[in-house]
Image (tube, helix red, strand yellow):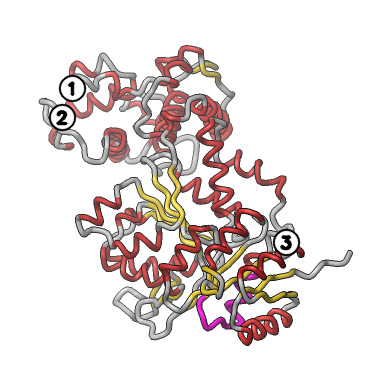
Amino acid sequence: MTIQQPRVLLVDDEKDLCMLMQMSLKRIGIQSEAAYNILQAKHLLKAQRFDACLTDLNLPDGDGIQLVQHVTEYYPNTPIAVITAYGNMEIAIAALKAGAFDFVSKPVCPEDLQQLLEKAIVPIEGNQDSTEIPQIEEQMLIGHSEIIQQLRHTIRKISKTQAPVFITGESGTGKEVVANLIHCLSNRKNGPFVPINCGAIPVELMESELFGHKKGSFTSATQDKQGLIQAAHGGSLFLDEVAELPMNMQVKLLRAVQEKKIRPIGSDVEIAVDFRIISATHQNLDALIAQGKFRQDLFFRLHVMDLRIPPLRERGPDILELAHYFIQKICQEWQIPPKQLTNAAQQFLLHQPFSGNVRELRNIIERALTLSDSNVIDVNHVKPHAKQTANHPIHAEQATTKVPHHSAIMVNSLASHPNDYSISRQRFKLPEEGLEAYLENIEKNILLNALEMTHWNRTMAAKKLQMSFRSLRYRLKKFGLDIDGDEDS
């Protein structure tokens, strides 16, 4: 079977530049046609099939962005990239927002041209089987509500470009899932997907983690280390909670995004990196920019294509679809028989506000599977213990009779050792990190105390906490405290 050579349309009024680009493309097996203005380009697009188009932005009969819009509207399967003057990022970003696949700066070197067109043409040759797309989407982004269908449609469009993507949404909505889906549907899917939670890296280690370092560049640098940005070469870099970046890291990230080059700590040489950046936050960046806590120029570089992830409460029937998915998945992981939600439990879930969104729903299902001793999950299993006392001043003696068994243990422990957790018997101060995270932290501390008291004998710890061994094992696994073995000696 003969493989047809790719064909590219080059649009630039500089005939010498067109000729040089055509010679470069011919050497790598790509055929090309040249047009010297927008009108000529439109005629060629109508008369011939092209796998990609590359246009200058300054043309005799108009703005190159007009051609970008024309190709995007009438030839959606033809990726179009733009040639910009060196350093003119504002126009490049405008072109990306108009639908351009990518951009390259003048003077155009053969290596940059080849790399750009390889990224553009590979999907057209069938590297991504279109029949796989719905399967990938449904496996990663669960739900069939109208708002999720619209989100899938937007993700498909965004995935075709190399433009930076900025994802917003409440905590727990699945921003990393969506970022990974964009990567999997793009022509970078065979490259790495590197997620980074900017809020989880200590400030003093952040530059080394992101940019890497050379051996001997500081006291503990005993060997060379590759940074996470370099690890994303050829793929996608996902910066979650990007608002947590300190100002000095924002400056360095801005240069990495603009120039696609990084310099590890202690190195005199810059390293070229090819990555697509996807970032996310649940914070209001406009407010942070006004407060001087986030750089406006970095925001403009990251916020080219914006994507909002809807909260779970806006997704209607997706709540039950996700609940059934989590039940099936967790039962398989725990190797226990599958369980079913009762009608009452389903109705309860459908009417919850889910301030923690999909993450909160999964936590509720995990807790329900632990509490249920039969093959059904009823409404008393899915009721979050915090909601039952949320409207009242909490006193430990009262709470022990109003919450599920596992929460009563926690409150009893707090009552016995109030000073250990800085909790008074008066009205609680609202936790800054949110109720779910606050309670989980308390529960983890209690588990650690019980394990230390029993010298990490889990059977004795479970008895001390008046819970089943399986329930304790689940909690240890949840907090990353699990160790191998089913029983303790």
> Mark 2 is on which residue type?
Phe
Q: Element at badge 2?
A: loop
> How far is disc 1 from disc 2 in space, using C-alphas?
7 Å
> Mark 3 is on which residue type?
Lys
Give the left or right position of residue 331, taking residue 475 as reference. Answer: right
> Which image quadrant is residue 399 in?
top left
Quadrant of the image containing the C terminus: top left
> Which image quadrant is residue 441 in?
top left
Residue assigned mark 3: 46
> Which residue is depicted at the point 62% across and 59% down?
71
> How far is disc 2 from disc 3 in space, using C-alphas?
69 Å
Q: Of 171 and 452, which appears nearest the observer?
A: 171
Quadrant of the image containing the N terminus: bottom right
Q: Looking at the image, is mark 2 or mark 3 earlier in the sequence? A: 3
Q: Looking at the image, is mark 3 or mark 1 earlier in the sequence? A: 3
The residue segment tinted magenta is 105-117
Looking at the image, do the residues carrying marks 1 and 2 touch, with CB atoms under 8 Å apart? yes
> Mark 1 is on which residue type?
Ile
324 up-or-down from 210: above or below: above
User: Does residue 14 show up?
Assistant: yes
15 up-or-down from 158: above or below: below
